[in-house]
Image (cartoon, grey):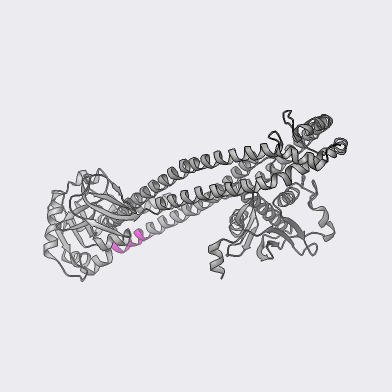
Amino acid sequence: MPESYAALRRRRLKSPGSLGAKLVLILTGVGLIGAAAMTLLLVAVITPSFTQLERDAVNGHVERTHAALNEFASKVKNTALDYGHWNDSYDYMEKQSKAFEDDSFAPSAMVNLGVDGMAYVRDDRSIVISRWIDKDQHDLPAKRAELDQAVRRIDYAQAMKGADSADFYLRLGDTLAAIGVSRIRRTDGTGDPRGYVVMARVLGASQLGNLLQLSRLDLGQPANDVSVVPHGKAIDIAVPILAYAGKPVATAAYQVPRDLSSLGQRMLFLAVIASVMLLIVVLIVLRLMITRLVINPLNRVERHMGVVRSSGTLGLLTEKPRRDEIGSLVTSFNSMLRQLKDLREQLELQSFTLGRSESAVAVMHNVRNALNPVSTVLSQGLGRSAVLDRTVVDKVLSELVAGEVPEVRRQKLVAFLAAAMQAVEEEREERRRQIEIGRGALHHVLEIIGQQQEAANERPALDACDLTDLVAQNATIARYSGESSIAFSFPSKSHWALGNRVILSQVIGNLFSNAAEAIAATGRTSGSIAVTIHEREGRVEIIIRDDGEGFDPVAAPTLFQRGFSTRAHKSGGLGLHWCCNSMLAMDGTLELKSEGKGHGARAVITLQAAPMLPEEKELAA
């Protein structure tokens, strides 16, 4: 009697050569090897990574310490430089006056300067005058004597190294002070030097604690180099504080917890446990479901092989000949694949050519829009006239150098020079800001090109994007995209959605560019673009509203067609076509609405909202 189908299937499952038995055996072996390999991989990746992170954190603490110490001393140097390049100081060194001493060395003046001690010193290191006060504005003779001794020991040529000012640290008895030294010249920097201005500011434990949290000042035997000593849960860091000759005079010491190392160990442990448990669960589930989800479907596929051969709906199957269910499928599929191969190759060739052409045109369109603000910034910079007439400045300087100018006239000339320098500085800052905007636009162009090179024919990866930040960046660039003055308004609160940051920024930039062109088309020299963002039912909606020329609502369905443009003088019409396709690729939509000509237009973008992070949920609650 012939064997039933059910009996034959049970016999195949029990046979060592059956597909089910092979899959169970292979998956078990792969699971064990995978668990071991994953453990080794996690150890090889996580441990060095967190070690490097800890090393970088320590280097950051050391750099922060150096920066804080340099900034503290630099302030003292700048204060000394203000007094050093001052006509009153220059005249005082030639002829001492009690009025200058009472005014410049008054305790209140020193408190306002933020220094504890100051002195005027001749080139031969002899002291003209010195003063030291405490926080209660009391003169301290003992500290003044320590300052005088230190001033006489300083090698000013070595400390200043040919410059007009310098800063360093010195021990003054049982305290450490930041020292600022400046040559004494006229206010405009001319004249033979007449000695030095020396100013000191005490750096104590409290000041160091304000600069560097959890710090202490060690005046014992300072180390020559930075010391990093790791312990079980903390790292001791000691940074030497240097004098002008490079010799350490004190040490800034503090302790930081080893959070990164502990985190790395916990992550490694959890990752290993989680990966092993996941593999075990997967193996158990696969072993139970092989018969139900693999063997039975394969038998059904075998019975319907004739239908599949005629329809040609399956993909490529490249299995080696075998004596199981998969082996029986290979022979049936190969005859069908021969029929589909030529058709698929022709279709892929045509799709590649068309996609490459459209992608190239879209990239050039976006690059053109991104380069518009660069051209505008450069044109504005070239057309701007000089804010300062050099002839007038030279005339003022020559009049000051003459030395026969009345004091009132001299003060007016000095005030004019100060105002002129401030105007030059403001002009320089304005040009720097415009160059920053141009540089941002060029960086945007590079991002566009790089993104297209990396994902030419791929679906863009979706990440959480801050829509408010993208709108703000493109609004800054759009202000310089044309001759019209455009007022932007957009929300300050962050709104997060799922999208590709570079492509989404290009879409918003294109829409801003179109809105700016619509405003310019009205003939006005100014206009406004308002952006609102709403979140509802898991979607984020961006509405870009302009007061430009608008369009006929009847033409709305054709705006996204390839090659269509609302302006007769323009050709191409690829911007909106590309924007619409890009939004569809990011699981979003793009709509254009208008009440008619002369009523402005609205662009409505919708995207899927990004999942809220745990900390954001806590803040929302």
Counting the numbered discs, the total is 0
Residue 408 falls inside the magenta stretch: yes
Choose top left, top right, bottom left or bottom right for residue 483. Answer: bottom right
Pinpoint residue 550: horizontal percent, then vertical percent: 77, 60
Pinpoint residue 375: horizontal percent, then vertical percent: 61, 46
Tell which of 256 and 380 is nearer to you: 256
Q: Quadrant of the N terminus?
A: top right
Residue 493 appears in the picture as rendered: yes
Pinpoint residue 303: horizontal percent, then vertical percent: 84, 39
Residue placed farthest to the front in the image? 1
Residue range (magenta): 406-415
Residue 238 falls inside the magenta stretch: no
Tell which of 284 and 50 is nearer to you: 284
Residue 183 appears in the picture as rendered: no
Q: Is residue 468 left or right of residue 85?
A: right
**Residue at the spot 60% in from the left edge and 55% down from the top edge:** 464
Pinpoint residue 90: horizontal percent, then vertical percent: 22, 55
Q: Is residue 160 left or right of residue 393?
A: left
Q: Is the stretch drawn in magenta largely helix, strand or loop?
A: helix
On screen, residue 195 above or below 32: below
Q: Is residue 547 left or right of residue 272?
A: right
Choose top left, top right, bottom left or bottom right for residue 5. Answer: top right
Q: Is residue 149 left or right of residue 198?
A: left
Q: Quadrant of the C terminus?
A: bottom right
Tell which of 546 and 185 is nearer to you: 546
On screen, residue 619 above or below 5: below
